Image: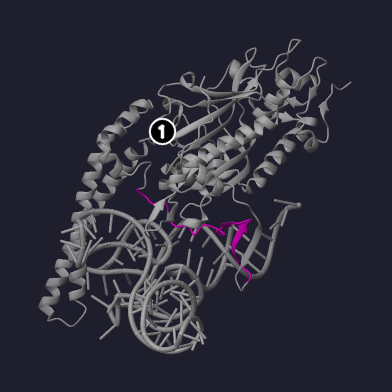
RNA sequence: GGAGCGGUGUCCGAGGGGUUUAAGGAGACGGUCUUGAAAACCGCUGUACCGCAAGGUACCGGGGGUUCGAAUCCCCCCUGCUCCGCCA
């Protein structure tokens, strides 16, 4: 086991900026329109000035792929992904050649049109018109060819995953993840503990059977104290995050396909976990990472606005197609749950420190709830395409296969992978616009937090204690059997 | 859902096929003047890609079309405002 309290050398100074204090101010124009809002020192543009997403933007810079081809190919192997970097490079070269030729042709067209502005002898005019006509045709041909090349380049480029952190463990599946830290010990009982499904039934807190009839499998009704417990978890998380300077949101539960793709989801993909809305070009979100990451699409930040920390409450919808059996029992793997998500936009040099910070917030929340957990450094094969590095918090779940660690939160540093595709940049000191780094982390995923609380805090008489930190938010300190 | 009017640069705002190299104004930035500032005056001003550079190409909400040539004309879409309908 490795102690995971190391801090990158660059983090120390950056953390103080991350923990900046807050105040609410609304700046209005003379007409009363909201010009911008400061949430305790964090100035938010009122709404992103929406520019179209850059059509050629990809997960990685093409030039980077070309210049670091060997590393990019090794990374694809490490992550057990299917992508052809050689093809991307050759398409990129082909595109450049075609574009160059097209621009030359356009220049000829512009010169020709310019020459025709004034008066011309009829025969010269006729000749110029004929020349323009031919240029128009060749330009159209070259444009069609360029469009085809760019389409293929985009398709192939999209498949190239983000580079992985050099220290991320190499491996294929979650069993290759590296435990770096353990806080608290697995809960010991002097009786036979129940799982949360049994507890939910005996205490009348969760109704799976009716939900199956009304909505389908993997849905659930929360009832009675469980309803309050979920709201208490939500409010508790928001209070923690507000104190730390996060700007809080309740986000839409729906997002457009282009935003999903910008974040790194592939809604039309064969193994997609995403519900799409028929005829809408939009999807139910699987996480508020999508809506918080899309919030600033097309934005150019002033450098002083960063880092920016957001937190969002949303419902999360996941199809979980093919997930069946023992592991999908109960609340652990469901089609809908409520989640409080953290999201951060940073300068590139600050993202490692911010990633440590997000992990520390997750740990603080679970420590304060007295839930035993461990921290896992996710291996390359389990990272998913956007993540550069990912930490999971796994809480002890006594009812899971007789006692097991189960993922409750996850925090990823996606570096500039999402920023490229959503066109989110900042103006650097040299005057150039550069891509920000984007990170996300779970504060609380309610369904899984409820599992951890119910199963770890159950008592011999079948009742459940409420973690002391949460009791004031619930208005009760235990859930007793009903008679 | 229906009707009408809009969407132009950092902002406001003109322009309705080729004197647009996007007028004019504001702001920001640089300078002159000043003890300092203000005012005045002069200059400058976005993004992406290619290029060592000079320079080139594209961008007037998005896409398509007409034309030798489109911010400008035509079609579709998105979006904002106003009114009507429906609705919590």
> Is A46 inside the magenta-drawn segment?
yes
Subunit of mark 1? A
- Tell me: residue A453, above or below residue B21: above
| Extreme residue toward the left, this view | A123
Q: Quadrant of residue A472?
A: top right
| Extreme residue toward the right, this view | A483
> Is A96 inside the magenta-drawn segment?
no
Horizontal placement of A443 versus A139: left or right?
right
How was this image coloured? Answer: one colour
> Residue A257 at x, y = what percent?
48, 44
> Residue A256 at x, y = what percent?
51, 46
Please name whichever residue, A303 or A199, is drawn nearer the observer in this view of the structure.
Answer: A303
Please name whichever residue, A319 or A136, is drawn nearer the observer in this view of the structure.
Answer: A319
At a point 67% along the width and 17% down the height, the residue shown is A398
At a point 52% along the width and 50% down the height, the residue shown is A307
> Residue A88 at x, y = what percent?
27, 39
Q: Give the position of the C terminus of chain A as an image quadrant.
A: top right
The segment highlighted magenta reads: A32-56
Please name whichever residue, A149 or B84, is drawn nearer the observer in this view of the structure.
Answer: A149
At a point 82% along the width and 30% down the height, the residue shown is A477
Please name whichever residue, B74 or A196, is drawn nearer the observer in this view of the structure.
Answer: A196
Q: Taking the image as drawn, is residue A458 in sight?
A: yes
Horizontal placement of A343 versus A115: left or right?
right
Secondary structure under the numbered disc 1 in the rendered image: loop
Determine the main secondary structure of the stretch shown in magenta. loop
Q: Residues within 10 Å of mark 1 (few under 14, many from 20)?
A: some
- Tell me: residue A120, above or below residue A17: below
Q: Taking the image as drawn, is residue A282 in sight?
A: no
Instruction: Name the residue tied to disc 1.
Output: A165
> Residue A224 at x, y = what percent?
80, 31
Q: Quadrant of residue A31?
A: bottom right
Horizontal placement of A10 versus A204: left or right?
left
């Amino acid at each position: 086991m490795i102690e995971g309290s190391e801090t990158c050398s660059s983090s120390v100074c950056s953390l103080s900026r991350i923990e900046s204090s807050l105040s609410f101010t609304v700046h209005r124009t003379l007409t009363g329109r909201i010009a911008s809002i400061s949430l305790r020192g964090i100035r938010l543009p009122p709404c992103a000035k929406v520019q179209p997403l850059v059509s050629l933007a990809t997960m990685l810079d093409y030039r980077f792929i070309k210049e670091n081809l060997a590393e990019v190919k090794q990374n694809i192997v490490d992550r057990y992904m299917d992508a052809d970097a050689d093809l991307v490079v050759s398409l990129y070269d082909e595109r450049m050649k075609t574009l160059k030729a097209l621009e030359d042709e356009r220049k000829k067209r512009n010169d020709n049109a310019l020459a025709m502005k004034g008066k011309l002898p009829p025969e010269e005019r006729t000749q110029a018109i004929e020349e323009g006509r031919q240029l128009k045709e060749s330009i159209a041909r070259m444009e069609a060819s360029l469009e085809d090349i760019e389409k293929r380049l985009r398709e192939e480029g999209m498949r190239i995953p983000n580079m992985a952190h050099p220290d991320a463990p190499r491996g294929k599946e979650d069993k290759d993840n590296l435990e770096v830290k353990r806080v608290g010990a697995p809960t010991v009982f002097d009786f036979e503990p129940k799982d949360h499904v049994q507890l939910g039934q005996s205490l009348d807190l969760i109704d799976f059977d009716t939900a199956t009839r009304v909505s389908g499998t993997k849905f659930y009704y929360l009832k009675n104290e469980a309803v309050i417990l979920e709201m208490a978890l939500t409010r508790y998380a928001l209070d923690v995050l507000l104190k730390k300077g996060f700007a809080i949101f309740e986000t839409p539960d729906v997002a457009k396909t282009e935003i999903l793709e910008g974040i790194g989801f592939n809604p039309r993909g064969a193994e997609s976990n995403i519900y799409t809305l028929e005829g809408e070009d939009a999807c139910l979100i699987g996480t508020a990472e999508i809506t918080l990451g899309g919030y600033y699409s097309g934005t150019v930040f002033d450098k002083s606005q960063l880092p920016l920390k957001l937190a969002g409450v949303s419902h999360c919808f996941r199809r979980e197609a093919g997930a069946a059996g023992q592991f999908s029992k109960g609340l652990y793997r469901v089609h809908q749950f409520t989640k409080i998500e953290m999201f951060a936009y940073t300068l590139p040099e600050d993202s490692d420190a911010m990633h440590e910070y997000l992990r520390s917030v997750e740990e603080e929340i679970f420590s304060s709830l007295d839930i035993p957990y461990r921290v896992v450094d996710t291996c390359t094969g389990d990272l998913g395409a956007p993540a550069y590095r990912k930490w999971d918090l796994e809480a002890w779940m006594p009812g899971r296969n007789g006692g097991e660690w189960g993922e409750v939160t996850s925090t990823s540093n996606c570096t500039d992978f999402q920023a490229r595709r959503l066109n989110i940049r900042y103006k650097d000191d040299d005057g150039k616009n550069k891509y920000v780094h984007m990170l996300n982390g779970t504060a609380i995923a309610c369904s899984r937090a409820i599992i951890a609380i119910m199963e770890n805090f159950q008592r011999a008489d079948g009742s459940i204690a409420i973690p002391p930190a949460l009791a004031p938010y619930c208005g009760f300190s235990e859930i007793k059997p009903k008679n």
